Image (cartoon, rainbow, N blue to C red):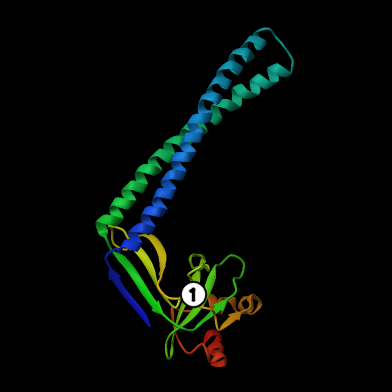
């Protein structure tokens, strides 16, 4: 079975979003704490080396200390500028995360593809293009998905799952994507080797989302894929 519909965000959607955005916010806060730790050090180092550099320069010294303090005098401002820039950028990103979350909750809409299947074929990954699966969703209908967002997890691929796209406040604005699994972990009827997939990569990568056929009839399926 394959269904396409829109629905309000459910508890699992909100739980996923809170976990994801809180993790990103904590990461930004952690980085900014590191910046505030190192910024005074570089500022003091710059000040001390600047004073020593000009003293040595005034004394016409020609030694390693002059070279060292001169290098710090030249390089430190760039490091300090980079730290300040990253701090400001991370602070703005934190604010943006809150805005995105508010927009998601305001729209309160998810675009969903619901797939229920007991039979599936898996393609081995070629290079880094991501996972690819063919799910039998009707007697003569196959659901094809491919991409890095579909890598195997402890729950996926599943016999019953939803592909959930979180919509933003503007038309055709997609803010997030995740997979919700409700069934049992599904094992493939067959794994197509990467050598075979690589040989027909152009045909396989351009497969439509819905294919007419049956994955148990391998010969006719390959005819459809390569035809």
Instruction: Identify whether 138 is placed above or below 148.
Output: below
Quadrant location, the C terminus:
bottom right
Instruction: Identify whether 163 is placed above or below 43.
Output: below
* Mark 1: few/some/many CA within 10 Å (<14, 14-19, 20+): some
Residue at the farthest right position: 63
Total marks shown come to 1
- Residue 122 percent coordinates (x, y): 55, 78
Q: Residue at x 35, y 63 (%)?
A: 12
Quadrant location, the N terminus:
bottom left
Task: From the viewer's side, name the closer residue of 168 and 159.
Answer: 159
Instruction: Identify whether 8 is placed above or below 197.
Output: above
- Residue 31 percent coordinates (x, y): 49, 39
Helix or strand or loop: what does disc 1 sit on? loop
Q: Residue at x 51, y 24 (%)?
A: 40
- Residue 96 percent coordinates (x, y): 36, 46
Kindly tell me whether residue 132 is visible in this rendering: yes
Q: Residue at x 36, y 65 (%)?
A: 165
Residue at the farthest left position: 106
- Residue 211 percent coordinates (x, y): 45, 84
| Apparent side of residue 169 relative to residue 78 in the rendered image (left or right) | left
Task: From the viewer's side, name the closer residue of 144 and 151.
Answer: 151
Instruction: Identify whether 157 is placed above or below 88.
Output: below
Task: From the viewer's side, name the closer residue of 220 and 24.
Answer: 24
Kindly tell me whether residue 206 is visible in this rendering: no
Q: Which residue is mark 1?
A: 185
Image quadrant in which you'd find residue 45: top right
| Apparent side of residue 120 relative to residue 111 in the rendered image (left or right) | right
Residue at the farthest front position: 184
């Amino acid at each position: 079975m394959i269904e396409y519909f829109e629905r309000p965000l459910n508890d699992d959607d909100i739980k996923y979003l809170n976990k994801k955005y809180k993790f990103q916010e904590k990461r930004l806060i952690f980085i900014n704490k590191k910046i505030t730790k190192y910024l005074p050090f570089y500022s003091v180092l710059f000040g001390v080396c600047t004073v020593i550099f000009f003293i040595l320069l005034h004394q016409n010294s020609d030694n390693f200390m002059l070279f060292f303090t001169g290098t710090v005098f030249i390089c430190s401002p760039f490091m300090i500028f980079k730290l300040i820039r990253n701090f400001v950028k991370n602070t703005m990103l934190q604010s943006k995360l809150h805005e995105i979350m508010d927009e998601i909750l305001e729209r309160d809409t998810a675009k969903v593809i619901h797939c229920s299947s007991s039979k599936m074929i898996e393609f081995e990954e070629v290079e880094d293009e991501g996972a690819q699966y063919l799910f039998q969703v009707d007697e003569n209908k196959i659901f094809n998905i491919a991409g890095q967002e579909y890598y195997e997890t402890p729950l996926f691929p599943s016999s019953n799952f939803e592909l959930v796209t979180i919509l933003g406040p503007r038309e055709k604005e997609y803010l997030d994507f995740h997979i919700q699994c409700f069934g049992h972990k599904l094992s493939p009827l067959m794994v197509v080797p990467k050598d075979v997939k690589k040989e027909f990569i152009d045909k396989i990568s351009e497969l439509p989302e819905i294919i007419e056929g049956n994955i148990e009839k391998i010969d006719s399926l390959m005819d459809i894929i390569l035809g």
